Image (cartoon, rainbow, N blue to C red):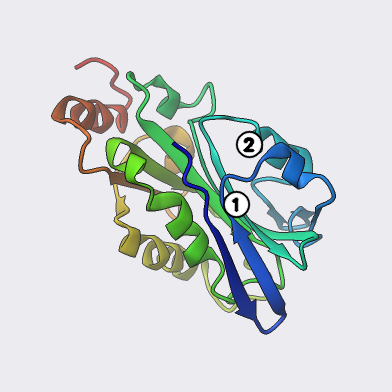
Amino acid sequence: MRARSIQEKETPKGRVELVSYVTPPELDGLTLDEGIGVFPRYRSILTNKQSLVNLAANPEANLCLAVHEKSRIIGYCVRRPPPAGERWALMQPPVLYELFGENARGWRELGLMKPMLAMVIKEPENEERILYIVGYSWHWDLDGSPKSLAQYRQTIIHLLAPFGLKQYPTNEPNVSLRPENLFMARIGDKVDQRARRRFTNLLFGLTED
């Protein structure tokens, strides 16, 4: 059952509304902030509004948006099934769900991501799921930031650890491509031992019990 949440948060830039389980019709009339897109040394995970519409239409996904003045999308947080073709989609039964999110340039360090993560992660249904996040360093926007890749990586870990996500080793090729890359997961309390074992095996490309 979808337990929709709506919160309002005051920021130095004005009031922002945080909304989970956004539907496709609700995206009509909203624009994507220009701080989410393609830049010379950085590329957002999602780069256009149609990507958000597709997520909102997925009954297995939870799209949470941060909306400024009821018109502009300045951040998002998503829980969705693993994309087809990725290693994580091979787990059967499918209890793995991917997490990812981003705030637009100019809207970071305002405390928006933590409440969005809470709205997406703290659903009771997630105790029967394994939530994971893949941190690819080429998706990290370090322009104008004093942080190195290693420091930014630690920032992500610090953000996610309070929600129960832990680092796991994996030989998945894209994660292994750079040492700064990161894989974290949260195993729900109601996930049985067989699913836990399959997840551990899948970290290293094994699909047999």
Instruction: State the residue position of label 2.
Output: 55
**Pointer 2: residues within 10 angstroms few (<14), some, or many (20+)?**
many
Which amino acid is tagged 1?
Trp
Q: Residue furthest bottom?
A: 12
Q: Is residue 136 visible?
A: no
The residue at 17%/30% (across/down) is: 192
Q: Quadrant of the C terminus?
A: top left
Q: Residue 204: name its quadrant.
A: top left
**In the rendered image of this protein, does residue 60 appear above or below residue 184?**
above
Q: Residue 173: name its quadrant.
A: top left
x and y percentages locating residue 45 in the rendered image: 64, 47
In this rendering, which labeled residue sits more in front, label 2 or label 1? 2
x and y percentages locating residue 28 in the rendered image: 81, 45
x and y percentages locating residue 163 in the rendered image: 34, 59
Q: Residue furthest top?
A: 208
Q: Earlier in the sequence, mark 2 or mark 1?
A: 2
Which amino acid is tagged 2?
Leu
Foreground pick, 156 / 122: 122
**Pointer 1: residues within 10 angstroms few (<14), some, or many (20+)?**
some
C-alpha distance separating marks 2 and 1: 22 Å
Foreground pick, 78 / 47: 78
Q: Quadrant of the N terminus?
A: top left
Instruction: State the residue position of label 1.
Output: 138
The residue at 48%/31% (across/down) is: 81
The residue at 63%/36% (across/down) is: 55
